[in-house]
Amino acid sequence: MQSAEILLQPGVFPRLLQGLWVTVWIAGVSVGASVPVGLLVGWLMTLRNPIVRAVMRVYLDFIRIMPQLALLFLAYYGFARWFNWNLDATGACVLVFVLWGGAELGDLVRGALTSIPKAQYESAYVLGLSPWQTFARVILPQAVRRMLPASVNLATRIVKTTSLAVLLGVVEVIKVGQQIIDVNRFQYPDGTLWVYGAIFFMYFIVCWPLSIVTRRLEKRWANG
Amino acid sequence: MFDWTFVERYAPFFVSGTLMTLFISVFGILLALAVGLVCAGVDTARIPVARQIVRVYIELSRNTPLLVQLYFLYFGLPKLGIVWSAETCAIVGLGFLGGSYMAEAIRGGLEAVPDVQRETAYVLGLSPMQSLSRVVLPQAVSTAVPGVVANVIFLIKESSVVSAIALADVMYMAKDLIGMYYSTYESLFMLVVAYLVILLPVSLFGTWLERRFDYAKR
């Protein structure tokens, strides 16, 4: 039990928090960039054009069926050879998470947009609103309500999936944990348990509030 | 550029990696289903203390990544004298993660059955067991199946992470071959094919199963 003291050593906890910050940063940038991509993808998916539809279908299905780790491998190892594009590990992570988040969010946007009754568009038109006004004032507020719970849930999944960045060599919270374990191997042979336990709870503390928000929104806007 | 002879020579590696992925996934999913059934049962039956424990477990499992859970099981637990093989860790990890997702799907199915159904069965003179097996479960299954199928696919995909604790699954093979021969095209090609071969049939079977159990909407 005294090996729990590893967490109290000077510098250990601040370093873990720094690593956590890298994780949260990747997740934050990815979620942020997914929003415009998702809106664009969702809008494209509602178009009648068969070619656009087919392309979007293949994009979404491919992203859905491949494990995120496989997508990371494709970006990190594949892009370097295919396009001579040497993405660093962090860049590959952000790219994959944006493509993935954009696809999933796009599908939510599509679902929300198509679920809004035609009468809403027609009424806005009759009231003399421009197409842009109709979208911004009438359609978007209703669509956002419908897709917000699932979108926050998607954000939780992105935060959890950033843990895979360590497998491409990004120095985030898990890697920092491994370094701390290695440095203190002789002084605290049982440190592994505590460091991984601490990381486990760090992820929990980041993701849990998002889960609670999801549940609140689901309850409040269940019939929105 | 693309070397087919390489694909032919190393395809057996990917087949064995794919089998490992399937082995871990199948047992992980079975464990997850068992855990999910127990948790959903405890939650719906409103058993006092057990119910709170189940809630805590579900929150912990849903809000932490599988990779961290695996590292904790594989590297952390031996310090408490619990030494499991990588296979066991992977299956327990998938069961721990998947159990909460399955529990939510099954609970959703059970809750979707209106109380009136149970009361009617009771009034008609069915025993509790009969009303469960003849009235409640068939309807609950119909609602739960889509969620359970989605979780099965999710868990097969999540199993790609087990390569991190040195299990020779299909991800591990791809990484190994890229590292050894710099055969990026061929390895990534075989990786994509392997996952398509596993997941497309599962996804199609799932859609069929959903239609098969769709009596609530018929």
Image: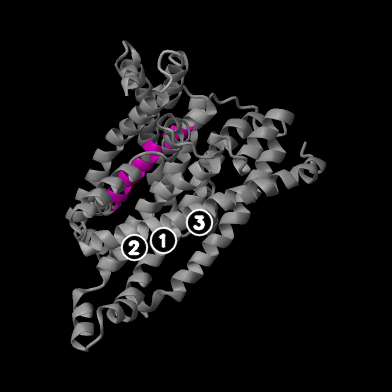
Instruction: Give the overall secondary structure of the magenta segment.
Output: helix
What residue sits right under mark 2 in the picture?
A: B106
Dot 3 alpha-carbon crowd within 10 angstroms: few under 14, some 14 to 19, many 20 or more: some
Residue type (three-letter) at the residue carrying disc 2: Ile
Over which residues does the magenta segment extend? Answer: A147-164
Residue type (three-letter) at the residue carrying disc 3: Arg
User: Which residue is depicted at the point 29% across and 67% down?
Assistant: B110
Q: Which of B51/A22 is in front?
A: B51
Tell me if I can see residue B103 in this picture: yes
**Mark 1–mark 2 CB contact (< 8 Å):** yes
What residue sits right under mark 3 in the picture?
A: A53
Is residue B95 inside the magenta stretch? no
What residue sits right under mark 1 in the picture?
A: B148
Residue B159 lies, with reference to residue A72, above or below; the image says below
Q: Position of residue A128 (x, y in %)?
A: 21, 57
3 or 1: mark nearer the eye: 1
C-alpha distance separating marks 3 and 1: 28 Å
The kind of secondary structure element at disc 3 is helix
